[in-house]
Amino acid sequence: AQSVTQLGSHVSVSEGALVLLRCNYSSSVPPYLFWYVQYPNQGLQLLLKYTSAATLVKGINGFEAEFKKSETSFHLTKPSAHMSDAAEYFCAVSLLTGGGNKLTFGTGTQLKVEL
Amino acid sequence: KAGVTQTPRYLIKTRGQQVTLSCSPISGHRSVSWYQQTPGQGLQFLFEYFSETQRNKGNFPGRFSGRQFSNSRSEMNVSTLELGDSALYLCASSTTGGNSYEQYFGPGTRLTVT
């Protein structure tokens, strides 16, 4: 079964500091991986996706993630945090089943950005 | 292009009642998936519809059902509501499904069961 594990349910960084949100996956086949962000009282917004084309994936709002097969990881990073980055972040793996698409999510990481 | 829309945004129901939630996908998207989000269980997959057919189903009781119309709009229904059904219900659409197609989420319907 495919799954993702997000280490750290809460991460706090100072404005301007590096953001690192951790995600490890478990998959018996090459995975398709996604990072989503959720702001309060909103739905999920896609930040970036990995679909085996390139191991370093750049997303929106200055975020990027690197797929490391040897470490089964897909950590999300941003060089310099901004107050507007405060939100909850979800890592997800896609399971192709029945010809369709089912996302399995991690438990989420709440990012706090402090002045 | 307009995004995924969900109606209503907020809903309060009483235990034992039933409820219907609606989702309109992005124009051209034929796959619609539903997810339940709760503080305790996180984000869980309910079901996926494609071309008016349920293609995948999560581990939810039969009280949870859905359907998709010919214009790709989808509804989900929950019968005999329980307090534990209080959650944010998210709808997501994608082009034709498959692993490489990302899903775009709507703002969700916040259901409160009292």
Image (cartoon, coloured by chain):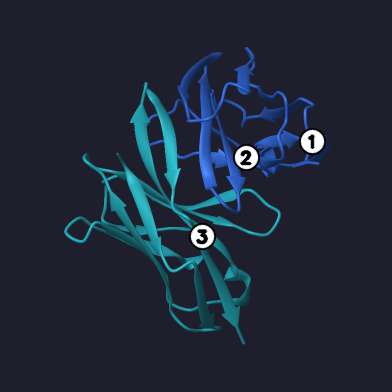
Residue A115 x, y percent position in the rendering: 62, 87
Dot 2 surroundings within 10 Å: few (below 14), some, or many (20 or more)?
Answer: many
Q: Mark 1 points at which residue?
A: B8
Residue B27 appears in which quarter of the rendering? top right
**Chain identity of mark 2:** B
Dot 1 surroundings within 10 Å: few (below 14), some, or many (20 or more)?
Answer: some
Residue B65 x, y percent position in the rendering: 61, 21
Disc 1 to disc 2, C-alpha distance:
12 Å
For the N terminus of chain A, give its image quadrant. top left
Which chain is displayed in blue in the rendered image? B
Q: Mark 2 points at which residue?
A: B90
Q: Mark 3 points at which residue?
A: A89
In the image, residue B51 sits, relative to residue B106, either above or below, namely: above
Residue name at image x 67 percent, y 38 percent:
B85
Residue name at image x 72 percent, y 40 percent:
B83
**The residue tagged with tag 3: helix, strand or loop?**
strand
In the image, residue A17 sits, relative to residue A73, either above or below, namely: below
